């Protein structure tokens, strides 16, 4: 047979060799594959794993619940309320084929939902496409803030549609509306923070824009968490991998008291102006109102541009927090400081007397007293009581401007008080140097006269004047005013920003006693300028002021009053300014009266 | 036919190389597991039923293997030309009445069962070349024989090439060369042939139609289509590389679950990526080792075979198997451009499984009928 012949042939020997060679070739081939696999999977596996992570995971930033803001007694001033939203999840609605089919499907689904819920559509076809392109792994919120009717319809008709879900969002709200608009401020949609840049997607989040919301934003926001979402090749969410829960924001407890704030607000009424009530002991602010205000809830979730423009163009400037950023001329409220400067420098005493004929001639200029007929002969106490300009011209000329500048700066005029709010105005105490720089001339006696009655270039804020009142009340300690009393962080009470620190001035007790006596007569006598602030049963010290401002042909008056009470062991320092009025005694004093009345009533009730 | 090997069916079965069977069944088992995994996208209730179909094909393949193994290979060799004619006929039929899948006309469907005649053609070519080169006293060194063998190969090659199925067509070339070499053709002749082939390749390129050129370019240069074939290459490399030493665990390979490895090719051409990702280097090396077991058994049988045809038959089956594994794994790790070659016994696919099991059956037959009594 054939096989037997073949076996005898020599080629079978070479065949064995060649088969072995083929085997060796195959071994080499597999060995080569093995090496390649080892290199890819073991030696360089990490690189491929990173590429895999990069292409299949997305990081989403999740903000924490924003901290709430309470007044000193626990009334909530800024809260988070639940807002029911309808969200759709694309991974459950995806359609085979091109993207346009998924868009089409979602589009018709929204039409159906709009019908069922009886709501107009908010999300256009374009929005759907944009969401698919940019934020596919996240749900798309198609309706926000459902009312009860829509919620009921949802529960009845639409809750079992796949891919559509009820989502509870947290929305900021301000229960007291305009009452705390300047202090508490408001929030707006946050922009991306540098710390959040390593996320692929952001969940809408609020950031403080004004007031405490802004000043304490980092505390209120807490620490954003995040989650890693596994996405499939088309970019749809597959599932969540890991999540780091967000840390909720810190709750703030303010020093403000809703009841005092309300009283101040009501007392100011619809007048433009500002008022601050603080504790002379430690600078706690009990009320801080600027009028007119605005409705902070308008800013949630975002203010309509029409509303925003109305606020911006309003000539009364409701967005301005006059209490800390209003530039005011102090007028006669500076007189206690002038008196104190003269007493401290030893050039005058309680019984130092000057005669007021109604004017003072200085070179060719005539400086008038507000009382044209003249006050006659006055000592320091009666001069304060009647707020006689001529007396203080002479007093200031006698002690010189340096002592007044020094004292004014010591009690905090011309620099920020350090209140824990943003956009505080520093104000200005003009001195010789400043005059040279801005007017190109030196300081004249006329400037000293202006300074003595709080006119000229001097600028103060109502808050600074409240601090002055507090310093007069507490014997020379300049407190640092603050609105946030304490915070709860991780269940522990803390005091933020070292609130309440003070600078002690070395005022002579006797000098201060004279000023206090004069200020007490301002309110406590029948002919004192601040008599309208008097409250039966309480001794109140105060000083009114009426400062002219504006162009010659349209003079307006800032009506001031600073006060503290009670005279012995004062617990309240008040500063009130009304933008346009007749005089401090007529317009500001009744406001002070209302404020102090409420304070004492509340004390008595407790 | 010799009386000598007329043993009973039972003794024939006992003479089977059970190492081959064990390794083949192991590969099939792995294959079914990972076809399941490749069709799994997170929901056990929505797994595509490929793994169940493959179970049937695997059973059929084993049956064919045993039946062929118990048949004397010399009887099969005698019918070699008939098999060859059948294969070529089916290839022609595929051109006339074939079903087109993704631009390539590879399938013949009868009563809902679809087969690829190219797979049958590969085995038929092994048989016919083994018969032609191994028959009788003639010296295989002559140019006439080399040329005839080349022509025998060229017919199915050109038909498969036209489908176009470049991968399968390409598998025929090393088959021819290795069989010629083992059959006794001097190495220098083969080297000369290779050089000649390379020289004439550009001429063949000119002979192609424009659309065919595009298809070849598409296959050869994945960068032309980064979201198509190029995408597969990149994602397959990421899948393999991210598997690490021990892999991510069964059903835990995200490349496949998240669809980065396209769902249409994960259970077929890219099954090795799924294995490499989920079973790591250890798993991929184990798969290669199982193939080495089969290959070594085939070549051992070739050494011990008592006829030249038998030897060539075994070497031919081994070369086919080796080429498929080498090119498929090479493609998976990015060494070769994407071609449609499956991983034999593991990938989802009926024709290739049954054809290859028939080939292994012939190896068994060579072994069974080479034993001296």
Image: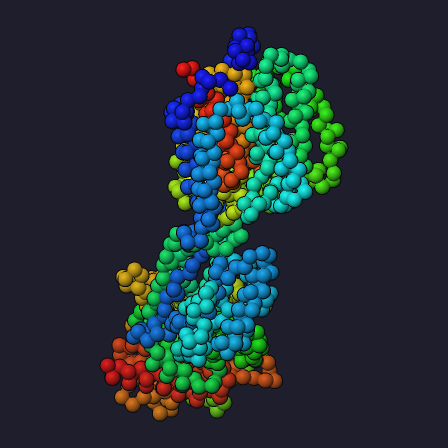
Residue at 46 percent across and 18 percent down: it is B3
Q: Is residue A47 above or below residue A480?
A: above
Residue A407 visible, this orientation: no
Q: Quick check: B283 above or below A526?
A: above
Residue A106 rendering spot, x and y as whole percentages: 54, 65
- Count the marks: 0
| Residue B62 image position (x, y, % from top left) | 44, 34
**Residue A588, percent from left and from top:** 42, 85
Name which residue lies at 27% across and 61% down: A492
Given residues B327 and B172, the one toward you in this image is B172
Q: Quadrant of residue B105?
A: top right
| Residue at image location 48% in from the left, 81% down from the top | A292
Q: Is residue B134 left or right of residue A596?
A: right
* Percent coordinates x, y for residue B290 in the rendering: 43, 29
Q: Quadrant of the C terminus of chain B?
A: top left
Residue B291 visible in image? yes
> In the image shown, does A568 or B10 lie closer to the viewer?
B10
Relative vertical location of residue B229 with respect to residue A174 in this rendering, above or below = above
Pick the residue in front: B319 or A405. B319
Q: Nearer the viewer, residue A357 or A160?
A: A160
Colour pattern of the rendering: rainbow
Which residue is found at the position 53% from the left and 24% from the top?
Answer: B75
Q: Is residue B236 left or right of residue A576?
A: right
């Amino acid at each position: 047979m054939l096989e037997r012949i073949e076996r005898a042939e020599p080629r079978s020997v070479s065949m064995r060799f060649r088969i072995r060679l083929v085997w060796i070739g195959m071994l080499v081939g597999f060995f080569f594959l093995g090496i390649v696999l080892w290199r890819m999977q073991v030696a360089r596996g990490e690189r491929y794993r990173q590429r895999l992570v990069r292409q299949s995971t997305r990081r989403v930033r999740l903000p924490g619940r924003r901290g709430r803001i309470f007044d000193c007694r626990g009334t909530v001033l800024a809260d988070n309320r639940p807002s029911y939203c309808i969200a759709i999840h694309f991974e459950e609605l995806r359609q085979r084929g091109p993207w346009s089919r998924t868009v089409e499907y979602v589009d018709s689904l929204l039409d159906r939902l709009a019908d069922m819920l009886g709501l107009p559509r908010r999300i256009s076809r374009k929005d759907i496409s944009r969401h698919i392109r940019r934020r596919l792994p996240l749900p798309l919120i198609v309706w926000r803030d459902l009312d009860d009717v829509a919620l009921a319809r949802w529960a009845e008709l639409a809750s079992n549609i796949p891919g559509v879900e009820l989502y509870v969002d947290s929305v900021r709200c301000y229960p007291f509306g305009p009452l705390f608009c300047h202090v508490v401020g408001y929030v707006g949609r946050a922009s991306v923070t540098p710390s959040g840049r390593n996320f692929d997607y952001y969940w809408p989040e609020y950031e403080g824009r004004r007031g405490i919301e802004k000043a304490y934003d980092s505390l209120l926001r807490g620490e954003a968490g995040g989650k890693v979402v596994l996405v499939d090749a088309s970019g749809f969410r597959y599932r969540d991998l890991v999540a780091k829960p967000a840390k909720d924001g810190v709750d703030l407890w303010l020093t403000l008291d809703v009841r005092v704030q309300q009283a101040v607000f009501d007392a100011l009424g619809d007048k433009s102006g500002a008022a601050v009530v603080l504790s002379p002991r430690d600078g706690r602010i009990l009320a801080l109102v600027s009028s007119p205000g605005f409705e902070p809830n308008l800013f949630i979730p975002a203010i309509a541009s029409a509303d925003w423009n109305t606020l911006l163009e309003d000539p009364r400037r409701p967005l301005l927090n006059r209490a800390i950023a209003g530039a005011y001329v102090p007028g006669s409220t500076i007189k206690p400081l002038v008196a104190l400067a003269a007493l401290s420098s030893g050039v005058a005493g309680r019984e130092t007397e000057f005669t007021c004929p109604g004017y003072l001639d200085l070179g060719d200029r005539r400086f008038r007293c507000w009382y044209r007929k003249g006050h006659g002969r006055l000592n320091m106490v009666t001069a304060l009581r009647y707020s006689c300009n001529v007396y203080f011209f002479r007093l200031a000329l006698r002690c010189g401007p340096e002592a007044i500048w020094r004292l004014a700066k010591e009690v905090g005029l011309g620099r920020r008080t350090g209140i824990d709010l943003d956009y505080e105005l520093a104000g200005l105490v003009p001195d010789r140097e400043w005059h040279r720089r801005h007017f190109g001339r030196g300081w004249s006696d006329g400037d000293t006269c202006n300074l003595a009655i709080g006119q000229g270039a001097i600028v103060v804020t109502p808050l600074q004047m409240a601090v002055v009142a507090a310093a007069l009340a507490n014997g020379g300690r300049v407190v640092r005013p603050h609105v946030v009393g304490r915070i709860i962080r991780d269940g522990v009470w803390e005091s933020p920003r070292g609130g309440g620190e003070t600078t002690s001035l070395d005022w002579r007790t006797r000098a201060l006693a004279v000023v206090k006596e004069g200020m007490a007569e301002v309110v406590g006598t029948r002919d004192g300028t601040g008599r309208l602030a008097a409250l039966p049963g309480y001794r109140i010290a105060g000083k009114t002021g009426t400062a002219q401002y504006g162009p010659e042909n349209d003079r307006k008056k800032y009506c001031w009053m600073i006060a503290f009470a009670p005279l012995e062991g004062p617990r309240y320092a008040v500063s009130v300014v009304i933008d346009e009025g007749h005089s401090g005694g007529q317009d500001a004093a009744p406001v002070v009266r209302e404020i102090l009345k409420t304070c004492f009533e509340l004390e008595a009730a407790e | 036919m010799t009386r000598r090997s007329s043993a009973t069916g039972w003794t024939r079965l006992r003479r089977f190389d059970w190492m081959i069977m064990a390794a083949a069944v192991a590969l099939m088992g792995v294959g079914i597991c990972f076809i399941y995994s490749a069709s799994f996208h997170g929901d056990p209730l929505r797994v595509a039923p490929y793994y169940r179909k493959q179970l049937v094909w695997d059973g059929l393949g084993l049956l064919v293997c045993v039946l062929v193994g118990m048949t004397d290979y010399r009887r099969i060799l005698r019918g070699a030309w008939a098999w060859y004619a059948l294969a070529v006929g089916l290839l022609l039929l595929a051109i006339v009445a074939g079903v087109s899948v993704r631009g390539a006309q590879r399938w013949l469907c009868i009563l809902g069962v679809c087969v690829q005649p190219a797979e049958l053609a590969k085995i038929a070519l092994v048989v016919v070349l083994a018969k032609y080169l191994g028959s009788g006293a003639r010296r295989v060194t002559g140019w006439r024989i080399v040329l005839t063998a080349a022509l025998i190969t060229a017919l199915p090659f050109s038909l498969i090439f036209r489908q176009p199925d470049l991968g399968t067509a390409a598998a025929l070339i090393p088959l021819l060369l290795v069989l010629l070499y083992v059959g006794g053709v001097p190495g220098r002749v083969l080297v000369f042939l290779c050089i000649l082939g390379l020289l004439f390749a550009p001429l063949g390129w000119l002979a192609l139609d424009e659309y065919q050129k595009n298809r070849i370019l598409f296959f050869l240069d994945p960068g032309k289509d980064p979201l198509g074939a190029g995408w597969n290459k990149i994602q397959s490399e990421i899948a393999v590389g991210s598997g690490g030493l021990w892999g991510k665990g069964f059903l835990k390979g995200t490349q496949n679950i998240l669809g980065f490895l396209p769902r249409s090719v994960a259970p077929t051409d890219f099954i090795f990526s799924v294995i490499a990702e989920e079973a790591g280097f250890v798993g991929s090396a184990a798969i290669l080792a199982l193939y080495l077991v089969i290959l070594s058994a085939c070549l051992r049988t070739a050494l011990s075979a008592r006829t030249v045809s038998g030897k060539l038959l075994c070497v031919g089956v081994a070369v086919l198997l080796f080429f498929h594994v080498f090119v498929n794994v090479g493609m998976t790790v990015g060494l070769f451009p994407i071609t449609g070659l499956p991983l034999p016994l593991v990938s989802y696919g009926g024709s290739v499984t049954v054809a290859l099991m028939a080939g292994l059956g012939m190896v068994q037959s060579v072994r069974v009928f080479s034993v001296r009594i």
